[in-house]
Image: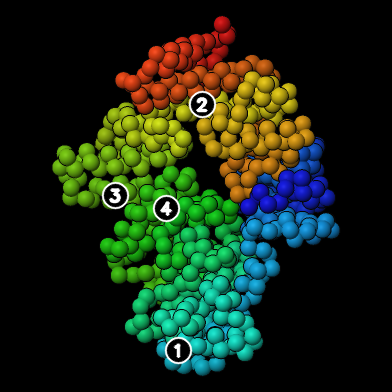
Amino acid sequence: MGGILSPELVDRVREAVDIVDVISDYVPLKRVGKSFRALCPLHEEKTPSFYVIPDKQIFYCFGCHQGGNVFDFLKVHDGMSFPESVRAIADRAGVKIEEKYFVGRPDADELEDLRRMNLAACRNYHKWLVSVPQGSAWGFLRNRKISRETVETFQIGYAPPGGKALLELARARSISGEKLAKAGLVTTGSDGQYRDLFWDRLMFPIADERGRIVAFGGRTLTEAMPKYLNTAETPLFSKRRCLFGLDRARDEMRKSGHAVVVEGYTDCIMCHQMGIRNAVATLGTALTSDHVRVLRRYIRQLTVVYDADEAGLRAAERSLELLLPEQMDTRVAVLPEGEDPCSFLISHGAEQFVQVLDSAKELIDFKLDMVMADPDYQTVAGQARVVDELMELVAACPNPNSRDLLIRRAALRLGANRASLTQICRSKSRPSRQNTGSEKPTSVTKRVAAERELLGTFFADVQFVKRALETGVTDDWFSSHECRDIARAVFAAFEAIGSNEIRSVLSRLPSESVESRRLAVELEELNTRKGRLDRRFEDAIECIRKIRCQDQARKMRTASPDSMCQQDWREWQSLVRKSKSARSDDGPDGDRIAS
Ligand SMILES: [Zn+2]
């Protein structure tokens, strides 16, 4: 939603505060030379690696690699959305932002309205539970050994039977059914009339990162299906991204750098009751990469706990495919058959649960164990298939280093040849989104390295931005989408105000592209090799130009190998010539002199 607030307005708000003042509210900063240093408030550390650089109005942590401007800080530290962070800073600095800048997205008042309704519903569900301390709801809670204190802490509630309770209450306060429907609290029946979504269910309020109620999960107390019912997607709530308990777990996660992910509400609640306060639960879905993106702000390591039954192991395997490429230290803990985290905690206690967590396996080892236990693995054909599948997973990892480590581990455990595994992995490499599929992985890496190198020169000296534009470089010279975002923002900043400053670039980067923002700060901040800029600029341009020509030539060839007309043919030959010219195969750091 960055397009709504113009970069000029965002800049004006940003200029009204000093990032040093804002961050000082969160963590004591100590001056070192031109910067300020602190223990990172975003990850656990013993020696300070968090820097605030007033000249550039940015922050950067050399430990967890978070970085950006003052809005990024509020986003990662407080879980604010971009407009929320702009508002917060504007309020602080006394800058008035007209409401019109927020049109096009659900406006802040409407969201606030939805939150208010959720909060009111939460209070009433809770009241309905505690006012009648008996019945099936309390039976369920007693069964799960959920204490009275926990009922209060998590504001667990009860939706009475009948399907009218909430609706009647709202009507008495002249809140329309339509509004309640928008908040996901009521639904329309077959007769077209509104009725409560939840009835005769035990209610678990779901909060966002900042503890504001955004949705509910309702556990049936009868035979009614489904067993668990969630609020549908609303402007406040997305199931794929939301983690139950995150608001309560985030401090502990930040402290320990570690999260425990379980599947159910009661699992998560019991963890907290037993003192495992870094536990969160997915809402009946497998862990998604969206979840990981949320968690990454707080932790470096996560342990996913699964049940040992068939369904649990299948779920583990499914999420494995999602998590392996995520570059997060992920471990898998499996409970004994027939147990879930809640029942295990009740019967074995927290200490033994922690032992299970400690014995969790790395993702790749877990997969290898499953693979090797498969009866199919005993046959040659089975082994080939298994290795194939495994390498497909490994090939999806974006980081060549971790790919290599995974291959090493697999080779060791499977007694396979590392070189041939590497080869299989290469053959599985997925082309990056915008390529046709014929590109070799080596040139992708080399190209991205050149793209980063080029962007580095842009930050080092504004004359290179000018020269690049004069040379005809556009944003689609950049194949990695982070680099493309940054190039676009650099060009936009240059065209608007003739600047290459990181602060103006950050204002023009999409607020939601965390990776691009981080990379921009890194390219600017870690750009230590200041020398040889001319050479680096030219080499990078040359390298990208060459790979682009190769690409185009290949595309022409594969698109119409037989039907190329005379003109196509000439064009193709010239592309091939261009792609072979200059410094044959060297990357941007090649040492040969340009011919
Ligand atoms: Zn950090």
* Residue 369 tag number: 3
Q: Residues within 10 Å of mark 2 (few under 14, many from 20)?
A: many
Of tags 1 and 4, which is closer to the observer? 1
Name the N-terminal-most of marks 3 and 2: 3
Element carrying mark 4: strand
Name the N-terminal-most of marks 1 and 3: 1
| Quarter location, residue 115 | bottom right
Residue with the mark numbered 4 = 331
| Residue 370: % across, % down | 28, 51
Whole-angstrom CA distance, mark 1 to mark 3, is 47 Å
Give the left or right position of residue 50, taking residue 122 as reference: right
Residue with the mark numbered 2 = 447
Name the N-terminal-most of marks 1 and 4: 1
Whole-angstrom CA distance, mark 4 to mark 2, is 33 Å
Q: Nearer the viewer, residue 121 or 383?
A: 121
Give above or below for 333 relative to 267: above
Residue with the mark numbered 1 = 161
Name the N-terminal-most of marks 4 and 2: 4
| Residue 384: % across, % down | 22, 38
Of tags 4 and 2, which is closer to the observer? 2
